[in-house]
Structure formats: structure tokens, C-alpha cells
Image (cartoon, rainbow, N blue to C red):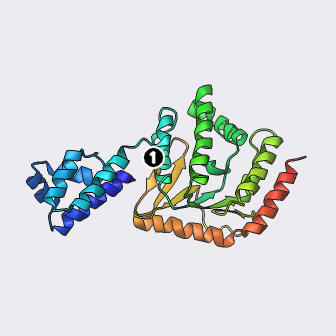
Amino acid sequence: MRRLKLGQELRQLRERRNMTGARAASGLGWSPSKVSRIEAAKTKPSEADIKAMAELYQADDEKIVELLGLLRDADQRGWWEDYEDVLPEEYTRLLGLEAEAIDQRDWEPQIVPGLLQTEDYAREVILATRGIARITHSGVRSRVEARLDRQQRVLHRPDPPTLCVMLDESVLMRRFGEPSVMREQMEHLLEVSLLPQVSVRVLTLESTHPVNTGAFIHLRFAAFDDVVYLESLYGARFVEDLELVAGYETAFDHIRSEALDEDESRVLIQRKAMMWRR
């Protein structure tokens, strides 16, 4: 995200000088593709590159300091990079985007979202796909650790994003592991739902389901366009087209309009927790 911000700033400086990418490249003695890749955050520029572009675009000293600061920030290692060897590439990208998000909206019709999972529930969810994804014992352990680390980094950071989660009622009834695992998970859902920045609501089985879609995560940022993350059995993809993102936003609003409110949802979750005591 910091590299995207840097590219955006450089593009804006160029456009304010009414320069095309080709003209800027000519003035810098570069290929047009280098300018394009830097602005699109596909290539990380060097400090010398930043200074050369800033000079061509007649940026003042204050702006140059800001650009170099963004470059240094982009060089910082994200916590999720410690798990790159065990997590899919798309998922690590999600974690990087999530670290910059100010608002996150999750719709989950099958399982409790990773941000709200207990350690035992997370392990059972990962084990359920182990035979398909061919995850080793150490891989299961590393993925559980990454999931718990993610929760701390997102939910308990100094400036946590607003998190709004919509759960289908079937999520509360689908068993992973022993009943004690499910009971603990229900109790954890109740606890997390009391955090000031977290909203957990349930779409009951009796509700009119207003939209037929699988799980998705909608991320909002302070200075960038929204992104939607979609996960499938063998991979994941990001939706960045503004019109399509708006469609997911509308779908989420429809689901929320049919769901129980927060207090009613807690009552239902409590009832399910009692069910798992049997």
C-alpha cells in the first residue's frame, strides 16, 4: 500500500506538469515502461530514481522529503512476510492490504471468519482441507500461528479498523472438531462482538436471503479505492474494478438489512453456545 501511495504521488506530480509518461521517460533517459511500472507500484524505485523524478517534476524540498519517507516505509518488512513460505501469495497480499485498511466488511456463509476464530477452531478448519491442499503437520501449525498473529495485528492494534461481520446462521451450527471446540468458539464470538470497533450480526435461516454470493471481504482505505477479496478452493483473487466493488457493497448492505441486529445476534449466538454444551 505504501508503494501504491508513492506511485500515486509521483503520477500526480507528473500530471501537474502536463507530462505524459513517454515525455517524462524521455526527460529521465528511461524507458516509458519504467515510469509506468513505478507509478503502478510494480517496480520499486531507488532513492536516486525518486530524486530524479522529483527534480524533473519541479517538486519542492518538502515534497521530496515526503516521497523519500514513503520509499523508506515501503522498504519496511511486514509481519506477514514471516509466513510467506507457508501461506498462499494472494493471502499474504490480503494481510498487507488489511494492515492499511480503515474499514473491513466480511460476509461469511460457511465458517467463522479467520479474524474471529479460536485457536482450536482455526486448527480444525485448516485440518478439514488438509487432504485437498496437502498441508503438512508443520504447515497446519504455521497457518494457525499466522491466523492468531493476524488477529492481534488487526483487532488489537492502536488504530484498529472498523470490522463489520455478517454470519449465516448455519456457521453457528456447522461442527468443526469436538462440541467443546464449537462451544468455545461461540463464547469467543460473544466476547469479540463487545469490542467497540467490531460488529457481529447473524442472518437467520428464516430470513429472506437477498443475494446469492459466496464469502467475501470488502476493504476500505483512507487514500485508495476499495478492494474486495474472494477466496476459492485453489486460490483467491482481488476485485478492484470500481463498478464491481460497488456491486459487492450493495450485496453486503442487502444482507445486513435482513440480518438480526447486534443484540439479537448475541442472543442467538448464546443459544447456539448452549446447544454445543449437550
Q: Between 205 and 82, which is closer to the camera in this rendering?
A: 82
The answer to which image quadrant residue 223 occupies is bottom left
33 versus 256 height, above or below: above
Residue on which the image places disc 1: 93
- Closer to the camera, 72 or 272? 72
User: Residue 86 location, x and y as percent?
Assistant: 52, 33
Q: Can residue 136 be seen in this view?
A: no
User: Image height check: is 196 above or below 155?
Assistant: below
Residue at disc 1, secondary structure:
helix
Q: Residue 63: x percent and y percent? A: 26, 61
Q: Which amino acid does label 1 sit on?
A: Arg
How many marks are shown on the rendered structure?
Answer: 1
x and y, in percent, of residue 102 in the image: 51, 61
- Counting from the top left corner in percent of width and height, residue 68 is at 28, 51
Q: Is residue 275 visible in the rendered structure shown here?
A: yes
- Residue at coordinates 24% horizontally, 57% vertically from top-left? 64
